[in-house]
Image (spheres, helix red, strand yellow):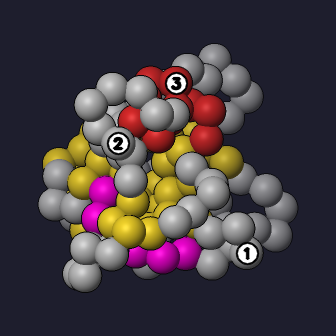
């Protein structure tokens, strides 16, 4: 089963690590539910004492997309670590097309990471945003 996790924003810039295709991940996510909307899983490093329940998502990354200004998405090879996205460290934080190596220019640091979780992993069914 594939699950989409939102990664980015200030939380990722603060202390998020790089995420690459084919990497095994273990995300802690807030479960955001809104009336008349698909439930969302949002990676968190800090907000575990908020009104939202949370889920652990463990599996292998099968797709990574950056969210563009118009709300559309574009595949990228990886999500750079937060410090790289902010221009610090050895990593230059660039985004790259996974098939051509072309540099992808994006002004937002919001990403959708698709994780393939084992069928036996127990996720709360309402929390799953399946593709």
Give the magenta range.
73-78
Q: Earlier in the sequence, mark 3 or mark 1?
A: 3
Q: Earlier in the sequence, mark 2 or mark 1?
A: 1
Dot 2 crowding, Cα within 10 Å, few <14, some 14–19, many 20+: some
In the displayed structure, does residue 71 sit left or right of residue 3?
right
Q: Residue tagged by mark 1?
A: 70
Write the residue at 69% across / 73% down.
71
- Residue 56 lies, with reference to residue 71, above or below; the image says above
Mark 1 element type: loop
Q: Nearer the viewer, residue 123 or 102?
A: 102
Indicate which disc residue 92 carries.
2
- Cα distance, mark 2 to mark 1? 25 Å
Q: Position of residue 8 (x, y in %)?
A: 54, 45
Q: Quadrant of the rendered structure where residue 126 is?
A: bottom right
Q: Are marks 3 and 1 in contact (CB under 8 Å)?
A: no
In the displayed structure, does residue 71 sit left or right of residue 83?
right
- Cα distance, mark 3 to mark 1? 25 Å
Q: Position of residue 128 (x, y in %)?
A: 49, 61
């Amino acid at each position: 089963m594939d699950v989409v996790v939102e990664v980015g924003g200030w939380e990722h810039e603060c202390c998020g690590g790089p995420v690459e295709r084919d990497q095994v991940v273990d995300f802690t996510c807030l479960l955001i539910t809104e009336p008349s909307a698909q439930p969302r899983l949002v990676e968190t490093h800090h907000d575990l004492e908020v009104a939202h329940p949370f889920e652990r998502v463990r599996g292998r990354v099968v797709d990574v997309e950056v969210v563009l200004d118009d709300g559309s998405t574009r595949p990228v090879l990886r999500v750079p670590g937060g410090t790289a996205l902010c221009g610090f460290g050895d990593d230059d934080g660039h985004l790259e097309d996974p098939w051509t190596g072309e540099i992808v220019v994006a002004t937002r640091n919001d990403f959708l990471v698709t994780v393939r979780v084992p069928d036996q992993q127990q996720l709360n069914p309402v929390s799953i945003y399946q593709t």
